[in-house]
Image: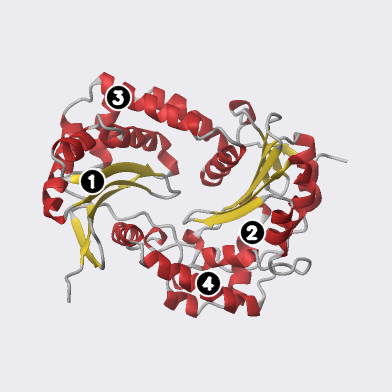
Amino acid sequence: MSDPFRTSTADPQLSSRLPANIYQRADGLTLIHQEIEAVPVVVTDIWVDAGARHEYPEDSGLAHFLEHMIFKGTDRLSPGAFDCAIEGRGGATNAATSHDYAHFYITTADRDFEATLPDLCDLLLRAKIPDDEFELEREVVYEEIAQYRDNPDDCLFAATMASLYPASAYGRPVLGTRDRLESLTPETMRQFHRQYYQPHNMTVTIVGNVSFDRARDALERHCTDFRPPASYRDDRPVSAPPRQTQICRDILELPNLELARLNLAWHGPGVENLRDGYVLDAIAMILSGGRSSPLVRELREQRQWVQAIGSYFSLQQDSGLFSISAWLDATYLQNVEEAIVARLAELHDTAIAPAVLERAKRQLCNDFVFSTETPSQLAGLYGYYHTLDRADRAFDYPREIATISPEEITTVARRYLATDAYTATIAICEPAT
């Protein structure tokens, strides 16, 4: 009998570039496996290319709501039975949904791997989505949305994304909105599930004290018999965000806000241009990665205009996000924004000092090493990269960072971080009534 798994044809050297095996089944399901004998645990993390960007606008929140409903059982598992089974063995389970993906993971003792994988596969492949549980869980999601709105930083992020991506799924909240969820039906969710929870859309990462043969054999026994796909949608428009041509400024007034918030944001590259994303990581580290970085040194240590300031690049499938955020007294909002823009102008006009760039590169490479220490971190890293692009790109990161030049810093800063075209989102305390 032929082996149902084969080495991925996308790149014959794929698995040799990672400390992991990457195999693809004939139906498209990908297994990424790394054996770590030193730890007596196994992490199984199943990634699905079915995030909020796959929804119709009128179904906003569907992918995240489905994450909740996955745990409401199958014909074989009653609601709550999966959690009880995992916790009863001393394991842990959780899930998450973003714009680009959903993933579901369990951590168990290595001896419990075969006993727990069947239930996880059953949930993902054959979720029942019962009507009565659907109505009960909708109230839970409403409460989650309310809690999100009570967090000023979450509100600030949502407003930034809505302004930066007005015509894209990235501009809609992953949790959705109450009015959209009110009209959602169990049948629509079942169609979404059967459309996207299919083998070609799944990456299974298994990391820990389990051999490849053992992991593959268990997966082949239990991650099969997918339901026939439904037709939720197959024509999702993917529209690039409009190019920023001016400064867009939104001001939120929030209750009981002790410190104002300032968030400046720019469109970045998607997975089609990861190299520029790596350079933006370096720029973020140069600007605010530690007390000696210019934004921290000037605005927090010397002028004491901000309590905290940081910058980051977040990779997304279609369009990444570069952001600089500060907590500060509202008195200094204009001063801080002008100082940030001035620092970006310096990056445009003056080559970064080699010593400064080398320090940022060391910090990024060290952070990468620290983020790959545990089985759960590795499983997440592999699944994330393979869902967005290819798993082998994950371990390209240190090499790519190490080869960034001062000239690239200037070029990429000019390409993405315009000083006269960005989104500024500000949160201040609402006036007392």
Point 49% across, 31% down: residue = 370
Disc 4 residue type? Val
Disc 3 residue type? Leu
In whole angstroms, how far apart are the C-alphas of marks 2 and 4? 23 Å
Quadrant, the N terminus: top right
The image quadrant that residue 419 belongs to is top left
Q: Residue furthest right?
A: 1
The image quadrant that residue 353 belongs to is top left
Point 69% across, 41% down: residue = 42
In whole angstroms, how far apart are the C-alphas of marks 1 and 2? 44 Å
Q: Is residue 176 visible?
A: no
Disc 1 residue type? Gln
x, y percentage for residue 117? Answer: 74, 51
x, y percentage for residue 48? Answer: 59, 53
In the image, residue 303 above or below residue 359? below
Q: Which residue is disc 4 drawn over? A: 140
* Disc on the earlier residue, 3 or 1: 1
How is the model colour-coded?
secondary structure
Q: Which mark is residue 307?
A: 1
Residues under numbered marks 4 and 1 in contact, where contact means CB atoms less than 8 Å apart: no
Q: Which mark is residue 197?
A: 2
In whole angstroms, how far apart are the C-alphas of marks 3 and 2? 43 Å
In the image, residue 292 above or below residue 224? above
- Please name whichever residue, 25 or 35, is drawn nearer the observer in this view of the structure: 35
Q: Which residue is disc 3 drawn over? A: 357
**Few, some or many residues within 10 Å of mark 4 (<14, 14–19, 20+):** some
Q: Is residue 192 visible?
A: yes
* Disc on the earlier residue, 3 or 2: 2
Quadrant, the C terminus: bottom left
- Please name whichever residue, 258 or 158, is drawn nearer the observer in this view of the structure: 258
Residues under numbered marks 3 and 1 in contact, where contact means CB atoms less than 8 Å apart: no
